[in-house]
Amino acid sequence: MSVLVLVEHDRGVLADATLEAMAAARAMASTLGAPVEALCISAQADGLGGVLAAHGAARVHHARHAILTDYGPEAWGEVRAQAVRARAPAAVVACGTGRGNEVLAQAAARLDLPMVAICGSVDPSRHGVTAVAVTRTRWGGSLLEDATASAPTMLLTVAHHAYDAAAPVAPGAGAAAELTVTLDASLARSVVRGRTERAAGVTLSTAPVVVGGGRGVGSADGFAPLQELAELLGGVVGCSRAVTNNGWRNHADQVGQTGTRIAPDVYFACGISGAIQHWVGAMASKNILAINTDKEANIVTKAGYAVIGDLHKVVPAISAEIRRRRGQ
Amino acid sequence: MRICVCVKRVPAPGARINVTDDGLAVDTAHLGFTTSPHEECAVESAVQLVEAHGGTATVLTLGPAEAEEQLRYAASVGMTDGVLLSIAETEWDPQRTARAIAAAIRAIEARDGAFDLVLFGNESADGCNYQVGVRVAHALGRPMVNGAKGLEVRDGVAHVQREVDGGRETYELPLPAAVGIREGINLPRYPTMKGRLASKKAAVQVVAAEGDEGAQRLTRLRRPEERSSTTVMLGQGPEAAPAVVDLLQELGVLR
Ligand SMILES: Cc1cc2nc3c(=O)[nH]c(=O)nc-3n(C[C@H](O)[C@H](O)[C@H](O)COP(=O)(O)OP(=O)(O)OC[C@H]3O[C@@H](n4cnc5c(N)ncnc54)[C@H](O)[C@@H]3O)c2cc1C
Ligand SMILES: Nc1ncnc2c1ncn2[C@@H]1O[C@H](COP(=O)(O)O)[C@@H](O)[C@H]1O
């Protein structure tokens, strides 16, 4: 009986999220008195044993197969399901990323077991089956759900950033083991076939400054002064869903529950009301400055700083002041 | 081409989400209802595919009788017909939801023929379980990829694109297939007056949902602790610019 971690990697490059899943697994394993084990899928992950041992894996299972040429949700899910049948772990943990959730859902479907997604905390106990009391996130993090579940093997994903990815004091033995899998050739149907690379540069999720515009900007052209301010500060433009729905900006710029989560040093929220679905994507910003005509707007009451006024006048004035101080 | 899109009726909260006194549900007393933006985009994808290839697009939901509103909305933007799997509660656990949807799709397909594509949202707006689509696809024996930001159908193959760090991955799923759609794949249209009128007449079949309960139980909903902050007012209008730039300097973002 173990707590088994799904090792998320991209053609052998470990995803940081895996280390968060390792941390969650260590916490569960110590309550259950069980070892942490890890499962690496595809020969591309052969080199990951060392780092997994450093993060507490007592044993690292490797599943290799000719169809595992790249990521594939069905093939990876089937490997997971076979690992559960072979090892009967108390729990399987993955980080709640796109791939982590997808692979665990595939495994859960194949095993007909529950899968509790996006848990912020997990409190396990075991009496023949594993029972958990969890707090999971709903509405992209705007609401918490206390829930319980029980199953012979508990399948869980943990919320990204809920667990500290730092290595523990005591490493695991990291003994390598082979997991023999039988995969039907048809599972290759959903394996990745190709990739296109994006040009590197500052992205919305990593930008130090985001200048966000909402419905108050009024038009696509209205974003020019926001763009200028963003460029002066080495940042990027963001927007609300009202903006993408109007076709003023591409969805790649949308901040929020169904857009991008941002964490800049400063977020300028211009002409944005601060609906909960927007806020949940912006709340990790270190400082928020709201620029709004309405001093009662939700964003104004939640932000650390605010300017009350017309963004079409305030934003250009900020840019002009920056240029003046730089002697431009 | 025959397409089925699964959508979930959810409340549309504004500034915050309030919970009922018993802690078991969202207080919807003063709220309108909608579906996830991902599901709106799945509906738009289906409508565009039918425009390009011909065929029909059915919208399906499992929910209370009121969820007919979301089916009619989907019909107003071009879906052909609707199926309401009715339940007495506002939602079922994800395993049970998937069992009921898979059984209903099997029954529809036995009567009217197989769906070439079954589309879902990447995740439901309220539950965020990331699994109902995957479970349904597996029960139906279909390949499934979630998180699609691109979807084209050519020669019996669904070409799916998905965003990852640093680029896009492509998948080629043989039809029949299932795909989970993400917002941003397209720009959903608004209903026209003609669409609104047509949606009133669209066929909506109501069937009692059937599925065994899953093993996950909600015990309580609650709001996360709010970071309480007092807002520092930097001023009114353009005259506030020097105070804003002072702040930027203090925060070290003015290099
Ligand atoms: C499931 C779900 C998911 C969602 N996901 C997202 C998401 O990811 N991201 C997102 O943003 N939204 C999301 N939404 C939509 C969200 O609920 C709001 O509808 C949206 O955020 C509103 O955008 P807004 O603030 O720009 O517009 P509004 O709410 O209309 O606010 C406009 C603001 O601009 C101010 N204003 C107007 N003119 C000026 C001016 N000249 N100068 C200064 N201020 C001015 C007004 O006072 C007002 O505060 C989601 C909704 C649902 C149901
Ligand atoms: N009650 C429901 N009725 C119809 N479709 C649903 C329902 N619940 C979930 N789905 C579909 O499954 C997707 C994933 O839901 P979830 O697993 O709850 O995140 C949603 O985006 C919908 O497409």
Image (cartoon, coloured by chain):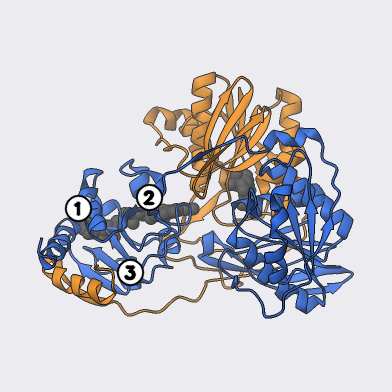
Chain colours: A blue, B orange
- Residue at 56% across, 69% down: B20
Q: Is residue A158 visible?
A: yes
- Residue at 49% across, 31% down: B199
The image quadrant that residue B174 belongs to is top right
Give the residue pinned by disc 1.
A225
Label 3 Cα crowd, 10 Å radius (few <14 / some 14-19 / many 20+): many
Label 2–label 1 contact, CB within 8 A: no
Q: Earlier in the sequence, mark 3 or mark 2?
A: 2
Mark 3 belongs to chain: A
Give the residue pinned by disc 3.
A288
Residue A284's x, y, as percent? 43, 68
Q: Which mark is residue A66?
A: none
Under mark 1, the amino acid is Pro
Residue B36 vs residue A305: left or right?
right
Q: Secondary structure at mark 1?
A: helix
Under mark 3, the amino acid is Ile
Q: Earlier in the sequence, mark 3 or mark 1?
A: 1
Mark 2 belongs to chain: A
Label 1 Cα crowd, 10 Å radius (few <14 / some 14-19 / many 20+): many
- Residue at 76% across, 73% down: A172
Quarter of the C terminus of chain A within the rendering: bottom left
- Residue at 24% across, 64% down: A291
Under mark 2, the amino acid is Asp
Residue A260's x, y, as percent? 45, 55
Q: Secondary structure at mark 3?
A: strand
Q: Is residue B100 visible?
A: no
Residue A200 vs residue A218: left or right?
right
Give the residue pinned by disc 2.
A253
Q: Is residue A86 above or below residue B23?
A: above
Q: Nearer the viewer, residue A273 or A307?
A: A307
